[in-house]
């Protein structure tokens, strides 16, 4: 991995020099726009809409369009006076329980590695934060944008997770929320039963990107000159007419699938043990009476 930013965690009077790394990467198959006839790459030019002339990158400024259609042009000098921190600091503002922060606020994750001289205070803060069970709420400036963020510990390393600001979260204004939709107790019980049946420990390694794998196969087939066979179309299921029947069928299907493909859970093992003891109980009583 290559570091993309260098700075320091500012914790009270303690400064911990760190390097920032992207913690995630997209595995999408990337494409170029090409000419269908000969595969030549398509290039784009920066052209001014007013005079039709190509514009050098050095002559490009940022423009803010008003509601009237007029454009306000901002130069580098206009941005210099803005209160954006250039100290490359991750300022710790407070410590809070992790469950108080809604995951919808999280934007992107980064790893923090300590510089050689910052290893001891890094480990000290890491251990203290991990034992507290809380996360650090911090403020940081990355890529000309100030962000609220959290610091948490994962696999012995600090993870910086940048956050959206409250006014960037949209309110779920949907019509059905104002409707009086009745749910029968037996339907709720059946839905809860379905959830219980499908309970399992989460292991991300069990899931994979089937679309990307299929797309890669198409590309490999093109390279090899083989005929590409399209996947069979699957019929999309419509909305359930009888909700109770659909829930019941889902529970049965989930039970059947769990019984053949999933290791037994502790709950299942306890249930089986209780059933065996219950079956054995009458035999013991029978021997005693004899």
Image: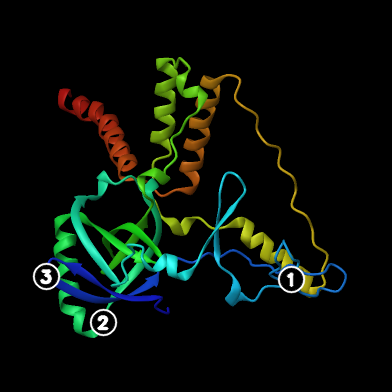
Residue 16 position within the rendered picture, expressed as x and y whole percent measured from the top left: 20, 75
Mark 2: give few (<14), some (14-19) or many (20+) Cα within 10 Å: some
The earlier-in-sequence mark between 2 and 1 is 1
Q: Is 276 in front, or is 33? A: 33
The image quadrant that residue 132 belongs to is bottom left
Marks 2,1: beta carbons within 8 A: no
Tell me the element at label 2. Answer: loop
Residue 176 position within the rendered picture, expressed as x and y whole percent measured from the top left: 50, 23
Marks 3,2: beta carbons within 8 A: no
Mark 1, residue position: 53
Q: CA distance from mark 3 to mark 2?
A: 18 Å
**Relative vertical location of residue 167 with respect to residue 145 in this rendering, above or below:** above
Question: Quarter of the image containing the N terminus?
Answer: bottom left
Q: CA distance from mark 1 to mark 3?
A: 54 Å
Q: Is 106 in front, or is 244? A: 106
Identify the residue at image location x=60%, y=51%: 70
**Relative vertical location of residue 116 with respect to residue 226 in this rendering, above or below:** below
Residue 115's mark? 2
The earlier-in-sequence mark between 1 and 3 is 3
Q: Nearer the viewer, mark 3 or mark 2?
A: 3
Mark 3, residue position: 13
Identify the residue at image location x=39%, y=46%: 104
Identify the residue at image location x=74%, y=52%: 231
Tell me the element at label 1. Answer: loop
Q: Nearer the viewer, mark 1 or mark 3?
A: 1
């Amino acid at each position: 991995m290559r570091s993309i930013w260098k700075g320091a965690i500012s914790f009270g009077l303690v400064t911990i020099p760190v390097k920032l790394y992207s913690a995630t990467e997209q595995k999408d198959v990337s494409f170029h726009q090409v000419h269908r006839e000969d595969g030549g790459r398509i290039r784009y030019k920066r052209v001014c809409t007013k005079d039709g002339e190509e514009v050098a990158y050095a002559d490009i400024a940022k423009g803010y369009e008003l509601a009237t259609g007029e454009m306000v042009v901002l130069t580098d000098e206009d941005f210099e006076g803005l209160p954006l921190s250039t100290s490359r600091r991750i300022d710790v503002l407070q410590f809070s329980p992790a469950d108080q922060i809604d995951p919808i606020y999280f934007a992107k994750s980064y790893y923090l590695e300590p510089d050689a001289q910052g290893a001891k205070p890094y480990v000290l803060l890491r251990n203290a934060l991990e034992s507290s069970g809380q996360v650090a709420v911090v403020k940081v400036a990355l890529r000309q944008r100030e962000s609220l963020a959290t610091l948490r510990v994962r696999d012995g390393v600090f993870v910086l997770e940048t956050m959206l600001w409250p006014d960037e979260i949209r309110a779920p204004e949907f019509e059905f929320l104002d409707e009086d939709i009745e749910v029968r107790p037996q339907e709720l019980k059946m839905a809860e039963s379905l959830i219980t049946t499908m309970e399992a420990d989460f292991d991300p390694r069990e899931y994979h990107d089937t679309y990307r794998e299929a797309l890669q196969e198409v590309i490999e087939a093109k390279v090899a000159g083989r005929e590409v066979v399209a996947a069979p179309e699957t019929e999309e299921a419509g909305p359930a007419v009888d909700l109770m029947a659909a829930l019941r069928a889902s529970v049965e299907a989930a039970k059947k699938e769990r019984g053949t493909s999933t290791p037994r859970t502790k709950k299942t093992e306890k249930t089986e043990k209780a059933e065996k003891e219950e079956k054995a109980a009458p035999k013991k009583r029978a021997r005693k009476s004899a």
